[in-house]
Image: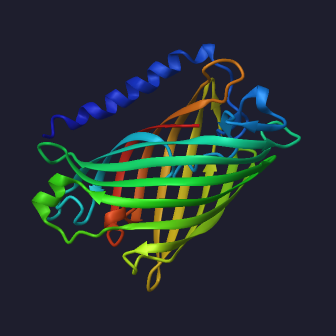
Amino acid sequence: MTAKRPTILPSLLFLVALTATNASAQEGFSSRCGAGVHTDERTGWIWLPEGQIFCPLAADPKEERSFVSYLRGDFATIADPEPGAKTNIGAVGLGDSFAIFRSAGNAAGDGIQLSLGAAVFTQFNLDATSFDLINADYLVGFPLTYRRGGFSTRLRVYHQSSHLGDEFLLSRQPERINLSFESVELILSQEVGALRFYGGGEAFFRRAPEDLVPHLAHVGVELRPAVLGQGRLLAAFDLKAVEEVEWELAWSARAGVEIARIPSPGHPPRVISLMAEFYDGVAPYGQFYREDIRYVGVGLNLSR
């Protein structure tokens, strides 16, 4: 069991190093936090455009992106560890956002855009013989985004439903919760040089169960202090406060390196990042929204 885990980090490092070897053939990073548009689609009304005008939230564990992470920590009753023992979790996500239309502004990359976004987030118990699936969260939504210069915003209506893994159900026989909800989210973001600040919140409706939290406040900051060829350093902090009897906090911190991959001249970049992670607070996994967890880890993320 334990002999398998050390192979994860070298594999992630190899993938990032392989991407870096092709950096000389790529264009430079966008001066923004990662989002960008095709050079031929900077003005006018565009159907099915390429690229995004609102940057992903780098430290938000429920941001639409594809990733694989190794996490180790205190996961409460999620993986049922022995008393005092740490639990090892493999987290895998598949997600992306598909642009439907954009009305471009006067400056390159400015405008308003409607997209379709979807993601699935899963957690696996690496301490189990068969790496049992614990939980899967499914998200689908319609983000309406706007950008003017360094200011951008995202208004999103989305649905989430969560489902426990078969092995987890058979071994634990928990009281199952048919958790699902719809939410309306508003995030405002401002970039100032190497810094990015954002804040906003969510209001949940059509909640099941009915005692699911009704509101969530959300703030964060990102710092990209240095560019290293086709890569750049990144440190990010994300804080959420959910409205229970009292406001309960959950904060996430990530730090590492981002590398841009541009398929051909003019195309917006795909961003590959290797990040160290820390999380403390209410679990972001749907079926375990009442649990408090803490972990450290490392993850490989793909976004644009």
Could you tell whether 286 is left or right of 256 in the image?
A: left
The spot of residue 210 in percent (x, y) is 40, 80
Toward the top, the furthest residue is: 25
Toward the front, the furthest residue is: 47
Name the foreground residue: 224 vs 106: 106
Question: How many numbered circles does the render carry?
Answer: 0
Q: Which residue corresponds to the image point at 50% horizontal and 66% vertical from the top-left?
A: 182
Q: Is residue 241 above or below residue 143?
A: below
Q: Is residue 3 above or below residue 124?
A: above
The spot of residue 33 in percent (x, y) is 66, 42
Toward the bottom, the furthest residue is: 245
Q: Which residue corresponds to the image point at 57% horizontal and 50% vertical from the top-left?
A: 57
Quadrant for residue 173, please give it. bottom left
Q: Is residue 217 above or below residue 271?
A: below
Quadrant for residue 17, please give it. top left
Q: Which residue corresponds to the image point at 51% horizontal and 16% vertical from the top-left?
A: 21
Toward the right, the furthest residue is: 106
The spot of residue 268 in percent (x, y) is 66, 30
Q: Which residue corresponds to the image point at 38% horizontal and 23% vertical from the top-left?
A: 14
Q: How is the image coloured?
A: rainbow
The spot of residue 120 in percent (x, y) is 40, 48
Name the foreground residue: 284 vs 221: 284
Tell me the quarter of the image containing the N terminus: top left
Tell me the quarter of the image containing the C terminus: top right
Could you tell whether 160 is left or right of 191 in the image?
A: left
Q: Is residue 118 visible?
A: yes
Q: Is residue 60 visible?
A: no
